[in-house]
């Protein structure tokens, strides 16, 4: 099943962490990375009193069901030092954040997993890298990624050469 994942972080050597996280995802049984966006420097969102984030997006093929893929992503986050239950505050600093955005054409509402991601259509830091690799992707119930991106303010987001 095709799936799209957002990556980000703003603590430590984020570029190295994102590269290592992508390698860990690709090395996981039942998951193959199909495409990766460039990295983007993005202003902090939600809590602005922290360093900028670096964000990217992945397209993957997964043999796991959505909850299994999410569990794998959360395990990779933990391996890179992310402790979700101890985050200082929602949207606070973190070494790695992996969000399952879209899983095929599925719409799900399970404890701990809502698909498509409930706020992806509001977040330029997700839509800019996602539009690079999947501009025509239809987000169930929301529309095409390129159309969603046209509706948000993407100022301040810069590709990292």
Image (cartoon, rainbow, N blue to C red):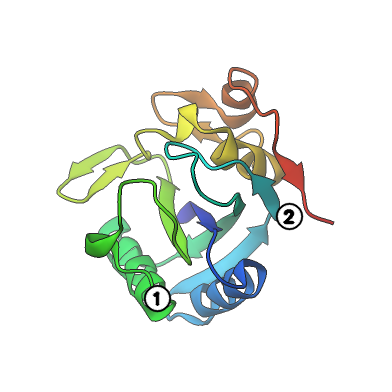
Q: Which residue matches tag 1? A: 81
Residue 1 coordinates in the image, percent (x, y): 44, 56
At which x and y percent is residue 41?
A: 68, 49
Outermost residue, right direction? 161
On screen, residue 89 versus residue 153, left or right, reads left
Look at the picture and state if 161 lies above or below 20: above
Q: Residue at x 17, y 46 (%)?
A: 110
- Depth check, front residue: 99 or 35: 99
Secondary structure category for the residue under label 2: loop
How many discs appear? 2
**Could you say which quadrant of the image residue 79 lies in?**
bottom left
> Which residue is at a point 30% across and 59% down the rendered structure image?
87
Relative height, residue 128 to residue 57 (above, below) = above
Depth check: give the residue in front, 84 or 61: 84
Q: Is residue 73 above or below residue 149?
A: below
Q: Residue at x 39, y 76 (%)?
A: 81
Q: Residues within 10 Å of mark 2 (few under 14, many from 20)?
A: some
- Mark 2, residue position: 38
Query: In this view, which residue lies farthest toward the front?
Result: 49
Left or right? Give the position of 140 relative to 115.
right
Q: Along the horizontal axis of the image, is 114 left or right of 62?
A: left
Specify which label sits upstream in the sequence, 2 or 1: 2
Q: Is residue 103 at least partly visible in the picture?
A: no
Compared across the picture, whether 36 is left or right of 89 comes to right
């Amino acid at each position: 099943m095709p799936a799209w994942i957002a990556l980000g972080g703003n603590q430590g050597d984020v570029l190295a962490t994102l590269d290592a996280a992508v390698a860990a995802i690709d090395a996981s049984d039942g998951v193959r990375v199909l495409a990766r966006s460039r990295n983007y420097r993005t202003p902090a969102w939600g809590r602005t009193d922290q360093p900028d984030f670096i964000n990217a997006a992945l397209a993957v093929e997964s043999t796991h069901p959505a909850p299994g893929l999410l569990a794998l992503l959360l395990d990779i986050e933990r391996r890179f030092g992310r402790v979700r239950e101890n985050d200082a505050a929602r949207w606070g600093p973190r070494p790695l954040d992996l969000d399952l955005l879209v899983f095929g054409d599925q719409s799900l509402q399970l404890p701990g997993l809502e698909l498509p991601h409930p706020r992806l259509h509001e977040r330029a830091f997700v839509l800019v890298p996602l539009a690079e690799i999947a501009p025509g992707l239809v987000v169930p119930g929301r529309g095409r990624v390129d159309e969603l991106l046209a509706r948000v303010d993407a100022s301040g987001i810069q590709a990292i050469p």
